[in-house]
Amino acid sequence: MHNCYKTKTPFLPNHLFPTIIILLASLVLLSTIATALPPSINTNANTSNNGNAMTSPSSIQKVLVTGANGYLASHIVQTLLTKGYTVHACVRDATNPASIRHLQTLPCVTPTNLKFFSTGDMADPSLR
């Protein structure tokens, strides 16, 4: 079987090539998401239908991010916060300070723009 990752590079072991390809693809995805997001809605936005905010992509104020304390999702959370969104972050255990500390210490976090929710562990038999 032919291995498409085999190469003659002395500085990088062959077993790391799949990991690097996945990381590069993830960075491309993250940058695409970051540039596609509209800026957060202005509180003085145009309204219609008896004062209700218009439903358009730019009227989104809150975003739910699952797995928010993961590598990619934490960068997405940071991007959303810097663009002015309120982020509802789902994590396995929101009461575990070690798992959410890196999100709580982001420079763009305020007491009102980042909220944590526990989703539990799917492997936990009590959830079945």
Image (cartoon, helix red, strand yellow):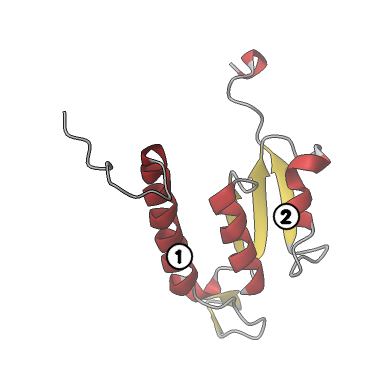
Q: Is residue 32 left or right of residue 76?
A: left
> What amino acid type should be assigned to the residue bearing mark 1?
Ile
Label disc, if present, on residue 103 of the rendered structure: 2
Q: Which residue is rendered at x = 49% and y = 69% of the image?
A: 34
Give the distance between the C-alpha atoms of the residues marked 2 and 1, in whole angstroms.
19 Å
Label disc, if present, on residue 49 of the rendered structure: none
Residue 118: in sight, yes or no? yes
Q: Nearer the viewer, residue 85 or 43?
A: 85
Q: Position of residue 95 (x, y in %)?
A: 81, 38
Q: Position of residue 5 (x, y in %)?
A: 28, 42
Q: Position of residue 80 (x, y in %)?
A: 60, 66
> What amino acid type should be assigned to the residue bearing mark 2?
Leu
Counting the numbered discs, the total is 2
Q: Is residue 105 above or below residue 53?
A: above
Location of residue 50 by image quarter:
bottom right
Location of residue 94 by image quarter:
top right
The residue carrying mark 1 is 33
- Secondary structure beneath disc 2? helix
Q: Is residue 41 left or right of residue 96?
A: left
Q: Nearer the viewer, residue 97 or 39?
A: 97
Location of residue 45 by image quarter:
bottom right
Q: Position of residue 33 (x, y in %)?
A: 45, 65
- Where the N terminus falls, by quadrant? top left
N-terminal of the pair, mark 2 or mark 1, is: 1
- Secondary structure beneath disc 1? helix
Q: Residues within 10 Å of mark 2 (few under 14, many from 20)?
A: many
Q: Residues within 10 Å of mark 1 (few under 14, many from 20)?
A: few
Q: Which residue is rendered at x = 67% and y = 35% of the image?
A: 92
Q: Is residue 23 left or right of residue 100?
A: left
Q: Is residue 84 above or below residue 47?
A: above
Residue 55: in sight, yes or no? no
